[in-house]
Image (spheres, grey):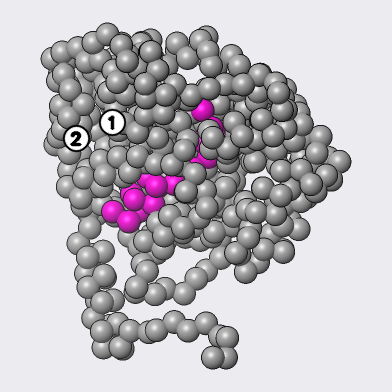
């Protein structure tokens, strides 16, 4: 062997046939769908029929090391040993499944939908949205800048790992937050006429989210596929979070009340919202819910906030986790500024994140020039719940300690 890479190529006749099939399928998409040939990247790449443009993005997300970490990141409930409780690895698959169901009926680009779905939560911190709030507060105190998981998801893929993902996928990830339910999701395309100008607009959006607390709430996806994922994110967690709360006996005595519009179970919610969306959106340049469905969805989301989400910051273990975040942040920042290469921020993050990349040395050299607080934020946000707990014990042995609720704890045995 000469050590050179060997990629088997398709027989030319088969390659042409596959290409013709792909082109025909693209031509048959909805007029408002995003077609593969309009995929935009910072650096141009050769097209291979085995990996169409947005399918390539799916694979790059799946194979990046951050995807593995979904498996031990909190969706809503932290520190429970319970395999029936949703982790982010399941949530992103549910979003992908729901979004692809909608996208298939609307004849949209399913590869683009899948890529946005799989990548949308890569930037989430350990301990879910509570961890996100804790990290943002510390980052803001140190730099005046805000941390948002949607922005960080795009940063990981575009800036840290430099995976050369398409603008359409990065935009969908950046703009996926649907904190305010809308009855209509109409794409907001970039105004520039060329790829360079559109990426500049994207970069400005990213920067504005760091400096303006309200900016992330005003983002709108540039594609119909991104709009579908944004709505599907809400559909995926609304009822599933209630099912988890019921299992843990947290926040809700009756996880579902009869809603005259949406139904009374998670499957009712999913089926009825999808059906209403597709009925109102087929062949249209927007994604739309009837007013009564949009109002019902917004109402049920507020029920979740009042009965589940808002309770967490006030009750243990979250006040303790907040203090642990502050201690870990301060220690890691000190180690990075002091160039302490024995610290985990070097051994487990800086020296680890680019391992296996052909451009590892150049990427690391560039990364070391980042503002120190940003490097610390990158590291903490990348952690799983278990990793954060182990790191805390390593950095501060003998200090405050949190334990998991076991399968057989008195609370779970009620």
- Residue 22: x, y in percent? 26, 70
Q: Vertical placement of 351 versus 123: above or below?
A: below
Q: Position of residue 258 (x, y in %)?
A: 15, 13
Give the position of the C terminus as an image quadrant.
top left
Quadrant of residue 145 within the rendered picture: top right
Query: Badge 1 is on which residue?
Result: 235
| Residue assigned mark 2 | 274
Query: Dot 2 surroundings within 10 Å: few (below 14), some, or many (20 or more)?
Result: many
Name the residue at 21% across, 26% down: 266
Kindly report the distance in space between the C-alpha atoms of the residues bearing marks 1 and 2: 9 Å
Bounds of the magenta segment:
110-127
**Closer to the camera in the image, 242 or 11:** 242
From the top left corner, tell me how far across and down residue 131 is, in percent: 55, 26
Place of residue 166 in the rendered image (x, y in percent of width and height, measured from the top left): 47, 57
Q: Secondary structure at mark 2?
A: helix
Based on the picture, tell me whether residue 305 belongs to the magenta stretch.
Answer: no
Q: Is residue 256 left or right of residue 368?
A: left
Q: Earlier in the sequence, mark 1 or mark 2?
A: 1
């Amino acid at each position: 062997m000469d050590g050179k890479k060997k990629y088997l190529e398709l027989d030319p006749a088969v390659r042409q046939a596959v290409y013709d099939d792909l082109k025909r399928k693209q031509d048959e998409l909805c007029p408002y769908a995003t077609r593969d040939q309009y995929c935009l990247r910072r650096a141009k790449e050769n097209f291979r029929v085995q990996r169409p443009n947005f399918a390539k993005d799916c694979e790059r997300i799946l194979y990046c090391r951050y995807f593995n970490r979904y498996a031990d990141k909190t969706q809503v409930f932290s520190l429970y040993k319970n395999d029936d409780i949703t982790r982010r690895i399941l949530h992103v698959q549910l979003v992908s499944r729901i979004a692809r169901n909608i996208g298939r009926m609307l004849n949209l680009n399913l590869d683009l939908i899948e890529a946005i779905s799989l990548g949308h939560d890569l930037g989430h911190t350990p301990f879910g949205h509570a961890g996100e709030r804790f990290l943002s507060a510390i980052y803001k105190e140190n730099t005046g800048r805000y941390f948002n998981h949607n922005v960080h998801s795009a940063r990981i893929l575009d800036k840290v790992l430099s995976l050369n993902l398409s603008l359409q996928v990065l935009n969908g990830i950046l703009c996926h937050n649907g904190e305010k339910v809308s009855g209509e999701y109409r794409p907001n395309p970039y105004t520039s006429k060329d790829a360079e100008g559109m990426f500049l607009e994207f970069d400005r959006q990213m920067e504005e989210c760091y400096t303006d607390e309200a900016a992330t709430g005003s983002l709108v996806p540039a594609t119909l596929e991104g709009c579908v994922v944004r709505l599907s994110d809400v559909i995926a967690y609304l009822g599933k979070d209630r099912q988890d709360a019921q299992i843990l006996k947290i926040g809700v005595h009756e996880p579902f009340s009869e809603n005259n519009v949406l139904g009374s179970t998670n499957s009712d919610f999913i089926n009825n919202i999808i059906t209403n969306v597709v009925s109102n959106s087929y062949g249209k340049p927007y994604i739309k819910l009837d007013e009564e469905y949009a109002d019902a969805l917004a109402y049920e989301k507020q029920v979740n906030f009042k009965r589940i989400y808002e309770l967490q910051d006030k009750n243990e273990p979250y006040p303790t986790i907040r203090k642990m975040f502050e201690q870990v942040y301060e220690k890691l920042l000190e180690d990075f500024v002091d160039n302490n290469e024995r610290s985990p921020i070097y051994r487990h993050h800086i020296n680890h994140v680019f391992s296996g990349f052909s451009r590892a040395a150049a990427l690391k050299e560039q990364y070391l020039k980042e503002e120190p607080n940003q490097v610390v934020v990158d590291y903490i946000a990348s952690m799983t719940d278990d990793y954060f707990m182990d790191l805390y014990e390593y950095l501060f042995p003998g200090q405050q300690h949190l334990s998991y609720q076991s399968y057989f704890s008195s609370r779970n045995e009620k």
